[in-house]
Image (tube, rainbow, N blue to C red):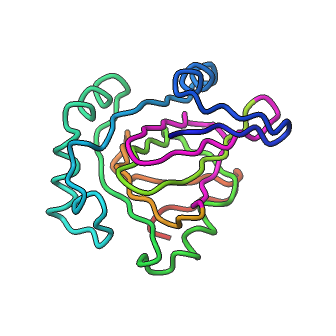
Amino acid sequence: MAKLVFRNSGKTITDSNQIKEFLAQYGVVYDRWGVDRLSEDIRKKYDIDEENSKTIIEAYRKELEELKSKMGYITEDIVVLSDKTPNLDGLMEKFKREHHHTDDEVRFVVDGSGIFPVKIDGDIVDIHVEAGELIVVPAGARHWFELDENRKIKCIRVFKTPAGWEAIYNENEKATMRD
């Protein structure tokens, strides 16, 4: 279950409707699609291959097409972070630095969990997500990503451009997933 933790006050919100309503005020989309349509072996497989990726994406085709139509997205893929990921700590250094994107950051969590700290009204709000949950951090929102104590997450990512993930740390420094 998602959870919001406000770093300045320590306030926590765990009710999914309250989370959705609060985040919507700031252009952040939160929704629950569930994972019950996926077998556990597909969901839990972290050695991702093309067949596994296609199966996962096809299981959510209806929701993905609705999201793409509504928000102008054109492509999707699967991203996996776990202890099996080569250079995981190096990748996490890029993700854990505050940044923004010119595209929305869209993640549907297939398995695992993580934290998206987002700057909202002078506070940092930690958005904890887990399997079955969708988050859309709007373009321009300052944020970063952290693995939680489980150190694994598998997500469907959705993009408006084929270029995919590009972080803008400041006006002179950019990074892509290829870096």
Relative side of 115 to 134, left or right: right
The residue that appears at 48% across and 36% down in the rendered structure is: 136
Give whichever of 98, 7 is nearer the camera: 7
Q: Position of residue 32 (x, y in %)?
A: 40, 33
- Check if residue 132 falls in the magenta segment: yes
Q: Position of residue 120 (x, y in %)?
A: 73, 32
- Check if residue 90 falls in the magenta segment: no
Q: Position of residue 50 (x, y in %)?
A: 18, 64
* Vertical order, 168 against 136 (above or below): below
The residue that appears at 14% across and 62% down in the rendered structure is: 51
Q: Farthest residue in the right direction?
A: 8
Q: Position of residue 28 (x, y in %)?
A: 56, 29
* Vertical order, 145 against 121 (above or below): below
Give whichever of 5, 134 is nearer the camera: 5
Give whichever of 6, 139 is nearer the camera: 6
The residue that appears at 60% across and 33% down in the rendered structure is: 14
* Vertical order, 154 against 70 (above or below): below
Question: What is the count of numbered marks?
Answer: 0
Relative side of 158 to 176, left or right: left
Relative side of 56 to 90, left or right: left
**Residue stretch in magenta:** 121-148
The residue that appears at 43% across and 76% down in the rendered structure is: 85
Q: Quadrant of residue 124?
A: top right
